Image (cartoon, rainbow, N blue to C red):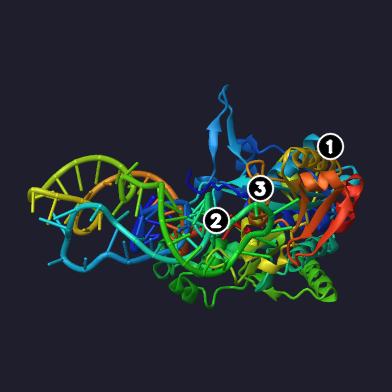
Amino acid sequence: MKGIKDITPDEMPGWNIAERTAHALAHAFGFREIRIPIFEKTDLYLRTLGHATDLVEKEMYTFPDRDGTSLTLRPEGTAGVARACIDQRLVPHPASRKLYYLGPMFRHERPQAGRHRQFHQFGVESIGSADPHADIEVIALLWTYLTALRLPGLALEINSLGHPPDRRNYTAALVSFLNGKEAHLCGNCRRRMEINPLRILDCKVPQCRDAMQDAPSLPNFLSPSSRQHFDRVQHGLRILDIPYTLNPRLVRGLDYYVQTTFEVSCSALGAQNAIGAGGRYDGLFQKLGGPAAPGVGFAIGLERVLLALPGDALPPPAPWVFIASFGDKGKAAGLSLLYALRAQHIKADTDHQASTLKTLLRAAHRLGAPFVAIIGDDEVADDRMILRDMTTKEQEIHPLGTATSAIISRLR
RNA sequence: GUGGGUGUAGCUCAGUUGGUUAGAGCGCCGGAUUGUGGAUCCGGAGGUCGCGGGUUCAAUUCCCGUCACUCACCCCA
């Protein structure tokens, strides 16, 4: 299917390191995992994401349930997490206010590099605190995660949209500035003037950038409290030595964002270079009929992380042993050893087709086995086993009775 | 939704103005005497040339359509 990918065994080491790092760092920052359904009632997304957004207008996988209820495969995680927090009454519990999730999202878009219809996100939501330190903590986790994986060419941009009244004032100023200049805008932006003028800010069409040259600046419209909040966020980032640049034109695509917004791009990625982004969404819970609770969070596109992941970030494969046993007695002894190791959680494998030492060793080599246990009839007769190191070609001899423990200690 | 590019062996790709048994490298399988892998040499298997139609005596090659993949626009993670 278009834009839907299999993740093959060869790709899994990268995924494992990306996911393990996510779990480890999220825990280190005091976030706890939550798993929510992969689809929700469509209404949830209509109410939270904004009707005029591209995501809602044309990218959702929406289908009727058997009773006619409209359902939608989740296109992002924040709305679902917020719904779950309300349903499960998590907000009052201090230990359940910092949550993270990992899993597939679905958007019906034309696929291209780093963009698929089913893709995966690692996201966090910090709920209940309007303090700038919540913003700092979330941004710090985002930055720590991406740098821990040693992704090249990262750049963090931040902005503040202010409180809703600030944004309304600015939007009004922007529209009045653009009135009469419609002819200089691209068709898309002319449409945006009606539905979402802020999005004209980050239009990439040159003529629109020219037309916006002298447009009113969003930071000038921040209320004193918004400005103070934003200043304190920046102060925290400086203390933590997290490099950032201010981008007064950074506007996020979803309607629920207010105040702080941020985005990390990765120059190693190509056109779709946003690797992680997020912001504050203080009105979201009320919009869903829940308790008033501010929140801030981010989402990271894991496919994009994998694309940028340097090859040497992958851990070396764990050592294991190939059992090369042949002859009637040798095979029997090899079979016992094979399962004894497995019972100890030691990776051990063989090739049941191969019957000669030559073919067994060839099979071991092809599977990339670092060690081979050789057991033929002669070995059984002498009550011994040969353990061969495939890289150094060194061989040691052990009694069959202690073969399992000898191999285990050799692999460590 | 719009535009460009590409579809030939498991993989990466050749294929000459349309011409008869469609090739290479890598990989895979086997062999080079009896219980030691990788190297070398020799041999072998494997292809509806994406699919459908059209032009032609003849199509992998030209034309149309279609599907898939891919990159970009839009937008986003």
Tag 2, which secondary structure? Answer: loop
Amino acid type shown at disc 1: Arg
Sequence order check, earlier mark of 3 and 1: 1
Q: How many marks?
A: 3
Horizontal side, residue A412 vs residue A197: left or right: right
Sequence order check, earlier mark of 2 and 3: 2
Label 3 chain ID: A
Tag 3, which secondary structure? Answer: loop
Amino acid type shown at disc 3: Thr
**Residue A266 drawn at (x, y percent):** 63, 69
> Which is more toward the observer, B38 or A55?
B38
The mark found on residue A316 in the picture is: none
Query: In this rendering, is residue A246 above or below A290?
Result: below
Q: Residues within 10 Å of mark 3 (few under 14, many from 20)?
A: some
> Which is more toward the observer, A390 or A242?
A390
> Quadrant where the C terminus of chain A lies?
bottom right
Horizontal side, residue B57 vs residue A402: left or right: left
Q: In which quarter of the view is residue A147 placed?
A: bottom right
The mark found on residue A356 in the picture is: 3
Q: In which quarter of the view is residue B38 placed?
A: bottom right
Q: Which residue is mark 2?
A: A115
Confirm whether residue A369 shows in the render: yes
Label 1 chain ID: A
Residue at 57%, 62% (x, y): give it.
Answer: A198
Horizontal side, residue A168 vs residue A125: left or right: left
Label 2 chain ID: A
Q: Which residue is mark 1?
A: A89
Query: In this rendering, is residue A181 above or below A2?
Result: below
Which of labels 2 and 3 is toward the front? 3
Which of labels 1 and 2 is toward the front? 2
